[in-house]
Amino acid sequence: MIRTVRAAAFAVAAFALAGAALWGTPVRASDAEGVTPTSYYLDHASASVAAFNRDLGVNDDAAPVPQALSLDALVAEQASAETNGAEQDCLANAVYFEARGESLQGQLAVAEVVINRAASGRYPTSLCGVVVQPAQFSFVRRGRIPQADRGSDAWRRAVAVAKIAGARMMPRLLPASCLWYHASYVSPSWGRRLAQSARIGLHIFYS
């Protein structure tokens, strides 16, 4: 009986040692064909950040922040002999006849005044209505806009400025309340009753 118990105990101990040898260490791919390697959190922590970003659709390099174009660059980009409809044509004519000798900022400011007037509720609601309103713009004769030289660089710039102002491609130069301007070499009486908003080139702008 004692021999039988000892034999059984020895068998149990041998089995336990064999089990410990089999399960005591993680299985590696080199130990057996087709066995999946054990994965630890450190494996994930050291995974390629680039691969992770690719999975998310993110570039490895930080995307460059788009830089706003300068007014000069925008005018060069938008310059054209053709306008996109009657309203833009009227605005381009106002820029051309009122400010073609001014800087691009001065031309843009004139365009903003026309747009401000149309939105103010105090003037006609269309750009063409503002431009041809009697006794407002000296280049208009009997409600008619004269013919601009549409083959000139000055006209192409005026069209570009009209596009930029109409689409708000640049930060505003003038407040929305700015509805009037005059040349700096004249001094109309109404100018003394208004608040001066800006002076750009040969034009003084008022709110």
Image (cartoon, rainbow, N blue to C red):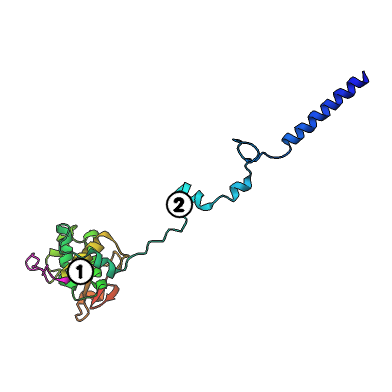
Q: Main secondary structure of the magenta part?
A: loop
Q: Quadrant of the rendered structure where residue 136 is?
A: bottom left
Residue 185 counted in the magenta span: no
Residue range in magenta is 139-153
**Frontmost residue, 59 versus 30:** 30
* 1 or 2: mark nearer the eye: 2
- Classify 190 as above or below 9: below
Residue 143 counted in the magenta span: yes
The residue under label 2 is: 58
For the residue labelled by badge 1, is the local secondary structure a helix, a strand or a loop?
Answer: helix
Left/right of residue 90 with respect to residue 197 in the rendered view? left
Mark 1 vs 2, N-terminal side = 2
The residue under label 1 is: 157
Position in image of residue 97 (x %, y %): 15, 71
Extreme residue toward the right, this view:
2
Which three-letter amino acid code belongs to the residue tagged 1? Arg
Quadrant of the image containing the N terminus: top right
Left/right of residue 3 with respect to residue 122 in the rendered view? right
- Classify 182 as above or below 122: below
**Frontmost residue, 53 versus 106:** 53
- Classify 87 as above or below 174: above
Position in image of residue 42 (x %, y %): 63, 48
Which three-letter amino acid code belongs to the residue tagged 2? Val
Position in image of residue 26 (x %, y %): 68, 40
